[in-house]
Image (tube, grey):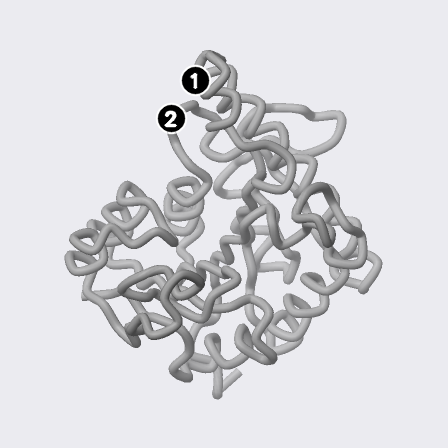
Amino acid sequence: MDSIRYHRVLLKLGGEALAGPKGFGIDPKRAEEVAAKVREVKDLGVEIAIVIGAGNLWRGKDGLAHGMERTTADHIGMLATVMNALALKDAFERLGMETRVQTAIEMRAIAEPYIRGRAIRHLEKGRVVILGAGTGNPYFTTDTAAALRAMEVDAEVLIKATKVDGVYEEDPTLNPNARKFDRLTYLEALNLRVGVMDSTAITLCMDNDLPIIVANLWEEGALVRIVRGEPVGTLIYH
């Protein structure tokens, strides 16, 4: 543990991390790949809480485009995150990791209700805690839920795991020459309107002095290097 910089982390995953080859649905093989990466970190003694999105199952903007009411669209998304949480839990437990799912919307038949003290106790006992259903409220993204839960469980860093290796001045898929930032202040990230995380989440982290690291989930050893304090991806801090 002496070589570990961050002993308790909040890992934010997009739902796309579980998607199959077509970018939709839950692929058990992908869930196993995510679980293996998380286990590498957990084996170092790091305590891990996870918030996952629902982009592989539901895009609220598609419902809105067809006239769906925003609250309804957001509630569907919250329920979809619980489906992803259960898929992750299954993959983790098949790799021997004790895991608990807690949800902001009570559904006691399949998961615990989110209770801060209980979540912290699970982490202290070495369990992975997956936090589903966002904040339980419409109009808030899972990025904001991740920032909120990170603060509540006293995480030392919020890791935003994506498909890109950091924050760029432009979309690197559209401009291969776009400049990557190794470090940004919160205000710089807000002014750039970075696409990897919404402004509410960044502001919440800024107000509570919580560092954000944006990194590529699929880069070999990236999560391990992050918790050891090595420079990976883009650090957003003061």
Label 1: which secondary element: helix
Quarter of the figure with the C terminus: bottom left
Residue type at mark 2: give it: Tyr
Q: Is residue 70 left or right of residue 1?
A: left
Nearer to us in this view, 204 or 219: 219
Could you tell me residue 104's position as x and y percent? Answer: 53, 30
Mark 2 and mark 1 residues within 8 Å of each other at the beta carbon: yes
Nearer to us in this view, 60 or 232: 60
Could you tell me residue 8's position as x and y percent? Answer: 48, 64
Residue occupying image coordinates x 42% and y 36%: 141
Looking at marks 2 and 1 on the same chain, the residue that comes earlier in the sequence is marked by 1
Residue occupying image coordinates x 38% and y 41%: 144
Quote the CA–CA distance across marks 2 and 1.
8 Å
Could you tell me residue 162's position as x and y percent? Answer: 50, 60
Picture layout, residue 1 above or below residue 178: below
Find residue 70 and name its label: 1
How many other residues sit within 10 Å of disc 2, few (<14), some (14-19) or many (≥20)? few
Foreground tag (2 vs 1): 1
Picture layout, residue 158 above or below residue 138: below
Label 2: which secondary element: loop
